Image (tube, coloured by chain):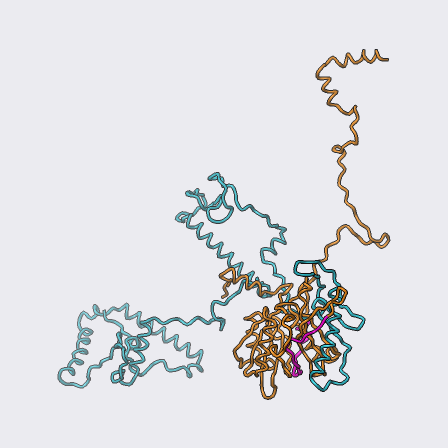
Chain colours: A orange, B cyan
Amino acid sequence: MLKIKTPKTHRGKRVLEKRAPKLVENEKKTLILHGTKTSNVLNSLLTEIYHLKKENSVKYTRRNDNIRPFEAGGETNLEFFSQKTDCALFVFGSHSKKRPDNLVIGRFYDHHVYDLVEVGVENFRSLQSFSYDKKVAPKMGTKPLIAFVGEGFESVDELKHLKEVLIDLLRGEVIENLNLAGVDRCYICTAVSPKKVFLSHCALKLKKSGTIVPRMELVEVGPSMDLVLRRHRLPNEGLRKEAMKTAPDHTKKKLKNVKGDPLLGKTGKVYIPDQKLGEMALPNKAKGVKRERREARNNKDPNKQASKKPKGEGST
Amino acid sequence: MGEIETDKGFQIDLGNLLAYNPNHHFASIPSSREELVKECLEKGTELVQALADSLFNLPATEDVDGPIVTLPPPTTRLPRQQHLPRPKPKTKWELFAEKKGIKNRKKDKIAYDEKTGTWKRTYGYDRANDEDDVPIIDAKPTDEPGVDPFAKRKTDKKQRVEKQEKNHMKNLKDASKSGALPSHVQLAATSLPISGSYAAPKKLSKTELEEVAGAAATSTASIGKFDKKLPGEKPLKNKGKHRKFLPVAQGKGMGLQEREQTEKILNKLISKNSHDSLNVNKAVKNINMQKEKQQQKSKQDKGSSKSSKLNAKKKSFKKSPYKGSSKKGPSKSKTS
């Protein structure tokens, strides 16, 4: 037997509606997790990712023994957390002898693991280790510019995949209107070698250049690190096709009364309303048309018609 | 607006504020870290500048907080978070209405109530022209006598509501099959779907528990006589009776009782008016019943001769301490 279950409060209903599949989706939330063991490097890296994406991320602080994203059955907990927190991206840090400072970045589709990229973190420099003028420090929640440098991002499959995942992770909300005063940060990703990517977070200094376009200057504010590619798992083709579907575009308005004719070309139909001749106003009212005066005169003196004749005779 | 390619060969996606330089290649990786970082930042600055060129050249509207530009939609395609919302399947009524060409008409929220001459709600409590809210119902020739028409209306209404609920459920089930349930509705199982015939375990009552505990306590060789009593354990209330057999051997006291018993019965049977003490009808009935039972048993044995071997012997040789089992004993015939 089944029974219908609905939220008891209106607030609960709103929460569910927010999570339901939509045509135009919200920004993807990021889930940040720790593995069984994490090094100092990873601890600070995960917190810094959390700080950079504070509005749209959830950070779990407990150690997770059962999460092994690349192994079969190791993603059950992860998928459960995704369902719970409504996250579409995750960053999972773990540290082992075989894979020191290991970072797994992955995406979910319908709360199931979509794809995975595993990287090792090297030469990590945290936010605190940079000294710069605090005036240029990027504000929270501004949309970052993202720059990818290197042919590797096009030629090497792993890097291509990493690029896509990084864009998803870093780009923030998709917006229509951008305040140019809020352009104050950028991420620089450089493919150093086919296995290594240098990733850095910079603040932007807008200098005057004499034209409308200011001269850009980058100030490293951190974190900055090298990402060494390890394992990766691409989504399977069917799932990819399914996930890449876009909402059908209904913005185009239906064109009415216009037809394409092979001989005449584009023809239009013009609608002309009925002419109401009775109600039409005359350009200027002639004297004879003014009936009221004549009638009024007739009413006043019924003998007038008779008297009119002799008058006429007299005149001729 | 699609992806922009600048003259330097940079690809720019303004919707994501993304720039990509596919032409750069490190001829030789710089040995020191500082140099590497410096070169990366240089290349990055170039890209960011190219991005800014196209960004700051977009038509901007001045605002108090700064110039605001409208970004084109992003060109880099990324996977969705969830599937596209699926179309809701039509309900059975909607299908029917479509077939018949029935169209929904909006009704006013309030309607004129002719009985009271006021405006009232069209539906709900205290509604206008409520047919059920009448003190007298005219009798019709088709009315069945002995049926309360008011109660009948009530039950009819209840049935209609139930039917509607059933239909609603069916439509929701159909919707859930195609994955198009409304976001705030869940269909939850009321019982565990382990199997069709699975019933939820019944809760035992207090008396039942006491009985079971007592049975367990008296299930030893000594019938619980020499067992340690648990703290708070009460003696079993409905203790089974022990069958007591009178001694067969002759002797004084008890020995005589057996003889007396049999003599008493014999006297009754042999006496002149023995017909009065015998209920012939009952006896015949009993015998017939026994015959029938035997016939049935022999039929069953023939039908499942194999399984009968495997079956546990139904007749227990143990003396049961309970009353219930004594019913299995020899059938009591006669005695009036």
Q: Residue furthest bottom?
A: A97
Q: Residue at x 81, y 11 (%)?
A: A310
The one of A291 and B187 positioned closer to us in this rendering = A291
The image quadrant where one finds the N terminus of chain B is bottom right
Left or right: B193, with A92 as reference point: left
| Nearer-the-camera pick, A239 or B50 | B50
The percent position of residue A24, horizontal first and vertical second, equals 65, 63
Q: Which of A281 and B63 is in front in this view?
A: B63
In the image, is residue A225 part of the stretch drawn in magenta?
A: yes
Would residue A242 be seen by someone viewing this image from the given angle? no
Q: Could you tell me residue A72's position as x and y percent?
A: 59, 81
Outermost residue, left side: B252
Magenta stretch, main secondary structure, is strand
* Percent x, y of residue A207: 72, 69
Residue A101 appears left or right of B218: right
Horizontally, residue A232 falls left or right of residue B266, namely right
Location of the C terminus of chain B by quadrant is bottom left
Location of residue A175 by image quarter: bottom right
Q: What stretch is highlighted in magenta?
A: A216-242
Return the x and y of residue A50 as percentages of the image width and height: 59, 74
